[in-house]
């Protein structure tokens, strides 16, 4: 299919009018407040749980090729020019990054939300510009890029040799297309189809690489006092054809709300399932983020109950060290993890959920439908709990209180016939079940209480 036919076809697909931010766009940004996030001092690598695309210090990359070397936005007022390179705050969410910029002298606030769908090889950038002053503002919004189409770090020389890029702007569709002169490598970007994009020379300090090309477009805005306007930017690419890249851009434009709802529903579900409360926020963050790659940890096979658990102090110290690195490089460690590549720190995200369960002393025997609980908290942990925790089709909530002379374990489960085996160190000789004292036997230094039921509470104290 010729380029002209591609353009005409996609213009038909994309031709819908742009609109100012409505409740739907506001809802997208507002929904982020419910999700797990990490505040980061500087943007680094992140893929936002989309293994098809990665942002690396401003560069936009597919697995096979780099699309853009860098990008930035510029706000031009009647008197000043602002290159928005340094956000006052950046929060990283499981599928979005939220940046805040404040132009105090102008009475302007800019919020930029970078969003990636689950599978599409593209990036959506939602730029919310708000006039917080008492006068109408005449503004110029610019999106500036430096393309640098080249093979990815993991691709060998047979994939293609980097050559000069060229950039074409199509006024009919409002789409910029960058192509490597010697390879079928493409990067495309644009805004809403109803927007009038004016190609301009970049004014921010973006210097393209040897074979790259700088490009920019400008959109005129007029904002009344307290008015906010959304300028979306869509970026996509392909190592196959221009048609494939523009088709992805078309999908990004039309599927924003569907893609967002899909990502939010999955993330919200993972966040609320197997939810822990422990007195260590770094480990909690690492545990929660690990669910977005590994899913919910499940005991996949039956087996012999462990005769001993890891030393809680040693395991706690290891998790503390891992969580420091984990939180700083959360997306790189989780979402772009390459099973074939050696790692300096092992294990990573796969380790967190089972390790935290070991600290709580929880083990599930699926075949015999028994949950074993041997409290294993570090000495400085007094309380820990987990809720909406699934072992096979049985949902449990388990809370543990561990003090010098008293251990309390409280459990609820949806399957009242499932077995519970609570094991307490033998020096805690006085045991109560649901407030009634019971006699217990000891084995290998532990008292074991075997029970079934929907609700169980064990209190063990020293004489």
Image (cartoon, rainbow, N blue to C red):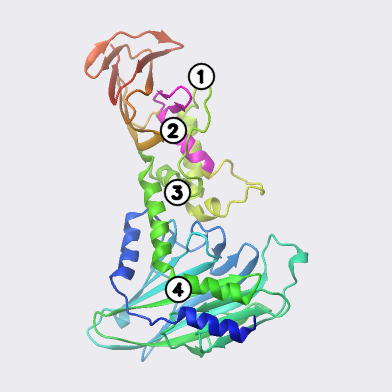
Tell me the crowding category of disc 3: few under 14, some 14 to 19, or many 20 or more residues within 10 angstroms, Cα based: many
Is 130 inside the magenta-drawn segment? no
Q: Is residue 213 left or right of residue 314?
A: right
Tell me the crowding category of disc 4: few under 14, some 14 to 19, or many 20 or more residues within 10 angstroms, Cα based: many
Query: Which of 166 and 377 lies nearest the eye of the viewer?
Result: 166
Q: Tell me, yes or no, whether the two marked residues, 1 and 3, touch with CB atoms within 8 Å.
A: no
* Magenta segment boundaries in residue numbering: 350-376
Q: Earlier in the sequence, mark 2 or mark 4?
A: 4
Residue that label 2 marks: 392
Q: Earlier in the sequence, mark 1 or mark 2?
A: 1
Residue that label 3 marks: 289
Q: Secondary structure at mark 3?
A: helix
Q: Nearer the viewer, mark 1 or mark 2?
A: 2
Q: Tell me, yes or no, whether the two marked residues, 1 and 2, touch with CB atoms within 8 Å.
A: no
Residue 233 % position (x, y): 46, 76
In three-dimensional space, the C-alpha distance between marks 4 and 3, rounded to whole angstroms, equals 28 Å
């Amino acid at each position: 299919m010729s380029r002209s036919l591609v353009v005409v076809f996609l213009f038909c697909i994309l031709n819908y009018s742009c609109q100012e931010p409505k409740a739907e766009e506001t809802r997208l940004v507002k929904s982020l407040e419910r999700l797990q996030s990490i505040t980061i001092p500087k943007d680094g690598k992140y893929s936002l749980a989309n293994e098809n695309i990665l942002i690396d210090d401003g560069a936009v990359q597919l697995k096979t090729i780099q699309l853009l070397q860098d990008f930035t936005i510029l706000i031009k007022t009647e008197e000043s020019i602002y290159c928005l390179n340094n956000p006052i705050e950046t929060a990283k969410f499981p599928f979005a990054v939220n940046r805040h910029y404040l132009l105090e002298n102008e009475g302007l606030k800019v919020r930029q939300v970078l969003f990636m769908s689950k599978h599409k090889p593209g990036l959506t950038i939602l730029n919310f510009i708000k006039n917080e002053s008492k006068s109408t503002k005449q503004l110029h919004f610019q999106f500036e890029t430096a393309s640098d189409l080249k093979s990815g770090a993991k691709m060998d020389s047979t994939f293609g040799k980097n050559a000069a890029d060229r950039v074409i702007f199509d006024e009919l569709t409002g789409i910029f297309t960058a192509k490597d002169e010697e390879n079928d490598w493409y990067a495309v970007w644009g805004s809403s189809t109803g927007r009038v994009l004016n190609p301009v020379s970049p004014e921010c300090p973006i210097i393209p690489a040897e074979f790259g090309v700088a490009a920019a477009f400008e959109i005129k805005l007029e904002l009344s006092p307290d008015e906010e306007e959304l300028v979306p930017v869509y970026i996509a690419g392909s190592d196959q054809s221009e048609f494939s890249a523009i088709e992805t851009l078309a999908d990004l434009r039309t599927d924003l709300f569907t893609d967002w709802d899909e990502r939010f529903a999955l993330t919200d579900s993972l966040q609320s399932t197997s939810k822990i409360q422990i007195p260590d926020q770094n480990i909690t963050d690492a545990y929660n983020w690990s669910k977005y790659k590994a899913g919910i940890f499940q005991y996949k096979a039956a087996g012999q109950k462990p005769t001993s658990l890891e030393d809680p102090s040693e395991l706690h110290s290891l998790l503390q060290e891992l969580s420091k690195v984990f939180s700083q490089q959360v997306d790189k460690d989780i979402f772009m993890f390459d099973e074939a590549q050696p790692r300096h720190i092992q294990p990573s995200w796969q380790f967190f959920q089972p390790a935290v369960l070991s600290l709580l002393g929880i083990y599930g025997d699926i075949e015999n439908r028994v949950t074993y609980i041997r409290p294993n908290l570090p000495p400085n942990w007094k309380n820990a709990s987990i809720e909406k925790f699934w072992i096979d089709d049985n949902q449990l909530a388990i809370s543990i209180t561990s003090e010098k002379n008293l251990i309390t374990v409280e459990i609820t489960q949806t399957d009242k016939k499932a077995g519970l085996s609570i094991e307490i160190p033998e020096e805690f000789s006085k045991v109560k079940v649901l407030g009634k004292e019971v006699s217990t036997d000891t084995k290998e230094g532990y008292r074991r209480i075997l029970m079934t039921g929907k609700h169980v509470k064990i209190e063990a104290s020293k004489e």
